[in-house]
Image (cartoon, coloured by chain):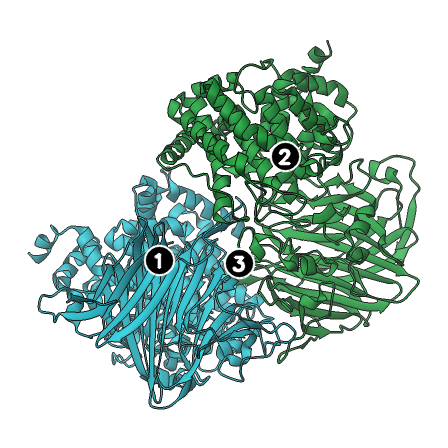
Chain colours: A green, B cyan
Amino acid sequence: MISLSIALIKQSALVKSIRRSGVFAFSVTLLVSVSALLSPVHASQSTHPNLVVNQQDVLTMRAAIKQPGSFKQAFEAQKAQVDSLLTQPILVPVPVDAGGGYTHERHKKNYQQMYDAGMMYQLTQQQKYADYVRDMLLEYAKLYPSLPLHPKRKSRNEGKLFWQGLNEAVWLVYTIQAYDFIVSSLDDTQRKTIETGILLPVADFLSVQSPHTFNKVHNHGTWATAAVGMTGFVLDKPELVETALLDLEKSGKGGFLRQLDELFSPDGYYNEGPYYQRYALLPFVTFAKAIEQNQPERKIFEYRNNILLKAIYSTVELSYNRLFFPLNDAIKSKGIDTTELVIAVSIAYGLTANNDLVDIAKQQNRILLTVDGLKLAQAIDANKPSHYPFNSREFLDGKNGDEGALIVMRQHTPTDQAIVFKATAQGLGHGHFDKLTWQFYDAGEEIVSDYGAARFLNIEAKAGGRYLPENKTWAKQTVAHNTLVVDETSHFKGDVKVGNKNHPIVDFYHHDDKLTLASAHIDTAYDDVNISRTMALVSVKVDDKDTPLVFDIVEVNSDNSHQYDLPLHYQGQLIDSNFARQAATEKLTPLGKQAGYQHLWLKANATPKKGVAKVTWLNDNGLFYTHSSIVDGNTDVLFTQLGANDPDFNLRNEHSFIQRTNSKQHRFVSVLEPHGEYNPSAEYTLNATSNLETLTYERQGDLSIVGFSVLSNQGSTAFVLAINHQTKNSLDNNKDNNTTQRFSYLGKTYSFDTRYQLIQISQ
Amino acid sequence: MISLSIALIKQSALVKSIRRSGVFAFSVTLLVSVSALLSPVHASQSTHPNLVVNQQDVLTMRAAIKQPGSFKQAFEAQKAQVDSLLTQPILVPVPVDAGGGYTHERHKKNYQQMYDAGMMYQLTQQQKYADYVRDMLLEYAKLYPSLPLHPKRKSRNEGKLFWQGLNEAVWLVYTIQAYDFIVSSLDDTQRKTIETGILLPVADFLSVQSPHTFNKVHNHGTWATAAVGMTGFVLDKPELVETALLDLEKSGKGGFLRQLDELFSPDGYYNEGPYYQRYALLPFVTFAKAIEQNQPERKIFEYRNNILLKAIYSTVELSYNRLFFPLNDAIKSKGIDTTELVIAVSIAYGLTANNDLVDIAKQQNRILLTVDGLKLAQAIDANKPSHYPFNSREFLDGKNGDEGALIVMRQHTPTDQAIVFKATAQGLGHGHFDKLTWQFYDAGEEIVSDYGAARFLNIEAKAGGRYLPENKTWAKQTVAHNTLVVDETSHFKGDVKVGNKNHPIVDFYHHDDKLTLASAHIDTAYDDVNISRTMALVSVKVDDKDTPLVFDIVEVNSDNSHQYDLPLHYQGQLIDSNFARQAATEKLTPLGKQAGYQHLWLKANATPKKGVAKVTWLNDNGLFYTHSSIVDGNTDVLFTQLGANDPDFNLRNEHSFIQRTNSKQHRFVSVLEPHGEYNPSAEYTLNATSNLETLTYERQGDLSIVGFSVLSNQGSTAFVLAINHQTKNSLDNNKDNNTTQRFSYLGKTYSFDTRYQLIQISQ
């Protein structure tokens, strides 16, 4: 009865409620409808395939590849690739290499090739594809039982086929699906040889023999439980499924369900950040899809208020111009077109038919040979307009959503301005000491940037392709980020254990059509220093043109005197500053000794006069950016370039400037503005100097009063922005019973009862 | 009679003969056919318009904008833009600013807007467009007579509307065309006011009042003569046309025809390089088109063996992945989509209907509202395949083709490997001291690079948008290039006058399907040092795969001992070297005091052991590059980063390494190879280390014997490349009577009678 009534609710409403954080009052009833949509077929335990793809799916796909369209094209391209594969010898070498080495890459290729050939068998029913998978599995069955632990193994996460057990789990996640595709073509002897020679031994190695990883609530644990659980489904071993879901002791303290409970925040944010989130996502959605086929009664996709769908949407949204925000340890070239997210988006589309996802799939530019891939292919072929709504959002962090948040502020389309304001928890071992840092993006590019991880993935000459030493000495350190450093020491003194126990508190987040505004503070990054930061992405109308401005107010308070450094890492070529700089022209020396400072060459320093200090740079996107700061005459500006104490040339030689002051209390108030255009190809340069004419700041009780004026055709247009710092939530919910706040500005009094007031006070 | 017989020759053959340097045996007869094609209509002196576009063209275009297609789209887009223009006030300010300033940019916009509105009047016959041009010209007629010389004028090239006379000439080139479009709509008073108030005064200023520029055989002179000559056509003043063609005294020592004789080499190469070539091209082709309309009997496009067409094709070919090779003073973002080349390509297509140009027009992605633009639009709409054949080519330099050459070596498509080997003359004031330098491109990107010009065009804060001081102290200096520096002194001691008098000699250039090979030498760059360089772009088959390799042999000879530095400026991140480096981790100091060395921070140094020294870097295109050099154990390798003595942060902080040795004679022998792939998005790294296993060099008489082997599936595949250094031309022309050359390699004797021999000597 409930599901019938729910069917009347428009699917788009359902989708919105899932994607957006916030109210989930309807979730219980909605879930029923999702369930009703998902599982028209009750999976039979005795038929194959039955993991991500079931027998009915295969029939649908076999029909689809006979019709013209992008699915057929994808099939034919894949078939040509697999056919060429079949002409090459099967190679199952004894494992010797670490990541990037020959045997490592060979075994990685093998699982993908088995998967592809297995799927090709299902689609074409040609025996040669099944034989290829069978023969390779028989080789593995010969090799594996005699293998010792990998000679290049890492402690605590050992593998046999690979240097780390993580890769071994990934291998099984793919291989068990390949086996599921071809098992019906095998005779009993072959089945037995393969199952007892390789599949069960790997599953056993990953579970019983690796309890530390298997039971761990961590993405490594997710890969292991997914691999083992899916093996349980295919080999009809319910015991394996149970331990995968609940941990080796079936206690529920670890296992897949516990991972679903703890690894994502209620908003689907993964605390290591999107780089690891997209990686972690794959075993989650793959195993979940297999559970859905085999145990639909679990309603796994509805588990914890649709946490998996939320995680998929979150991953998509934690990107700018197709690349993920490089939070924590993150390699910057990863983006929404990664395999993991291609699979996740297809599964989400299969579940929800949300048309917004078609836009993402188009950008991913890859059609999967699954029934969900088919649905997306058909949607793409239908060419219906689709624009994924990238909006400002607060992603709560922590399993209960109470450990800070990542705040994304956006204007307009995915390539317009975006701010990432990071007030999240530490993010475990891959976390950076970057409380309250920010990044800024505009016109497709990074403008105020985060270094990401110091790592050349799989390049042997660069520390074996692992994280470089500079990841620890530079990339994780506070000074590598756009946030406050006290006394040249990183947050939590660089101790990850302390970091994991503490997190910032978001005081408010507000978004409306005019601006996005947020404030957060942390009192635990340093023993005796309280830091709060308020950021706003605002667009004011000047001469009928939208003029975007970023406001940044950092307040530092201590009872003791300290050195306060506020670095800003900019991408581009320095054009000018409105104050004199003393450049180091004949000698460069490092700025400091530790906490990342040892990697910064000091290229110039300056002490701007009291007033507004401006620094302008030109980004590769052809736009100018000016950072304007209110300075007191005692604040130094240090211009640095990365690269000191880097004997192996591991670091990118990026640029930053650091505002430095010594005091107990200090307030850094600044505005960043994009302006003008440099177009040497068409030979014009427009508006190469800042449009911000004046900038003032005053604190009046709970209010920040920011006055500013912008150059306009008529001379100058003046504004005042008043921000109410009260942490009262009602301010952001437009409730009626707010206290009226008053402030005076240039001799006039103003009043308002909302989170902020932005007024144009002159033409 | 001749033209009839020629009509049978296929147009494509004609086109090939024009574009390619080399044999022009047929040129005399072919020219007749070009003439026959060009001028079906004899232009009437008394009708307007009649410069680049004539009355018949206008009728054709008026018909075309009624038909669907990209021409109509371009028209509509342009119309919308012009319509919005008409709603804005006409602004003709008193000139005060230099380049990039408001009045400068305003007057630049004005001429373009008059041109666009004038053309719109012709296409739509709506009076409002003509009125707009008229009103603006009347404003100019009011302003101009009272103007003094520009307050920010440059000496020897003064302007009134602009800081330099060059801009004034450009203004008139556009404005006279705009006037030609609307003159028929004016009454006599208006005509007289405009002609005597602004057009003739500007023409007079550019000619009689600026004889130095007007008579100069230089691109500034071309702009001036084009402006004045076209004014002569429109205002029916044959005197102006004559002086434009022959100089103020009609002596023929200067003027447009002399410029055609001297500013391009017989191959259409312009000695300042492609950056200035595309700029110079516009007045050449525009004025030539106007001459063709008004004095078809001059056969101006056939002048000097079709020199203008050759110049257009050369400009196109002096590019890689759409951007011009940054030779001499060149801003790197300029490419084939610049307005000048859009116009030039359309005119060339109008003359030749060469289908290859459609490919270029597609890449330019801009349809011109001219009848030539219409022809290209129709060709683009027809969607016939077109691939411009970018091939290896030797572009002879010097007006007689005897002052060295620019050699471009290419493989396959425009985004595959390309080498630029620069053995050209100095290139006047914009030339760099870079004799025998080279650049290398691969997979769309610069790999071994040239700095180009140190300039931020029109950015006021950067030296007023002019060339920066560092253009002279760095960009022009020899060490800023990939060529030999003796005793930390630039070629010709950095004296441009000496440079202009001397040039390298190309000893041979050879191209066939297997490789491109060239050798050149110069004995005048230094008093007592002879330098020769031989370069080859080779592709060898290894495991059935084409493996590209760049060979580079630099020979230096002197009777005295010197310090020889051979820099290589690489684009990318250093990955590894096969020798130990001592890095400067705590302090950086400049490498030298002068000649550009003062701008290089020394980041590391090394003295590799005797053998083959390798340096590997990773480019942004995701490929690895290894430079392998034969070293004697006494050669240092210095790793540098640009940026010392740069107080204003004007320089890009690029990387290089310099091989340094002290001796009388030295031979630098090296190989550059692209290899592998880094794909952090798909998480794989392939082949990150060099495939070149061995490298040996021996000189046997006239022969260079280079032995090398490449890693292959079977272990290693060995080759020997023998190069015959005899300067006998017959070697490159496959003549029969060559002397047989013998050489021995690894105990065997080989013989050949051609330019080179490349043999695989082992599996």
What amino acid is labelled 1 in the image? Val
Give the quarter of the image for residue B419: bottom left
What number is the disc on residue A206?
2
Q: Nearer the viewer, residue A347 or B328?
A: A347
What number is the disc on residue B710?
1
Query: Badge 3: how crowded within 10 Å, few (<14), some, or many (20+)?
Result: some
Give the secondary structure at mark 2.
helix
Q: Mark 3 sits on what residue?
A: A461
Q: Earlier in the sequence, mark 3 or mark 2?
A: 2
How far apart in space, not on screen, are marks 3 and 2 (Cα)?
Answer: 30 Å
What amino acid is labelled 3 in the image? Ala
Q: Residue A743: x percent and y percent?
A: 90, 52
What number is the disc on residue A39?
none
Residue under the image location 21 percent in, 61 percent down:
B296
Marks 3, 2: nearer the viewer: 2
User: Do marks 1 and 2 both belong to one polypeptide chain?
Assistant: no
How far apart in space, not on screen, are marks 1 and 2 (Cα)?
Answer: 41 Å
Residue B578, compared with residue A280, is above or below; it is below
What amino acid is labelled 2 in the image? Leu
**Could you tell me which quadrant the C terminus of chain A lies in?**
bottom right
Residue under the image location 59 percent in, 59 percent down:
A619
Question: Image check: B402 left or right of B627?
Answer: left
| CB contact under 8 Å: marks 3 and 2 | no
Q: Chain of mark 3?
A: A
Give the secondary structure at mark 1.
strand
Q: Chain of mark 2?
A: A
Query: Badge 1: how crowded within 10 Å, few (<14), some, or many (20+)?
Result: many
Residue B283, compared with residue A57, is above or below; it is below
Residue B264 in view: yes
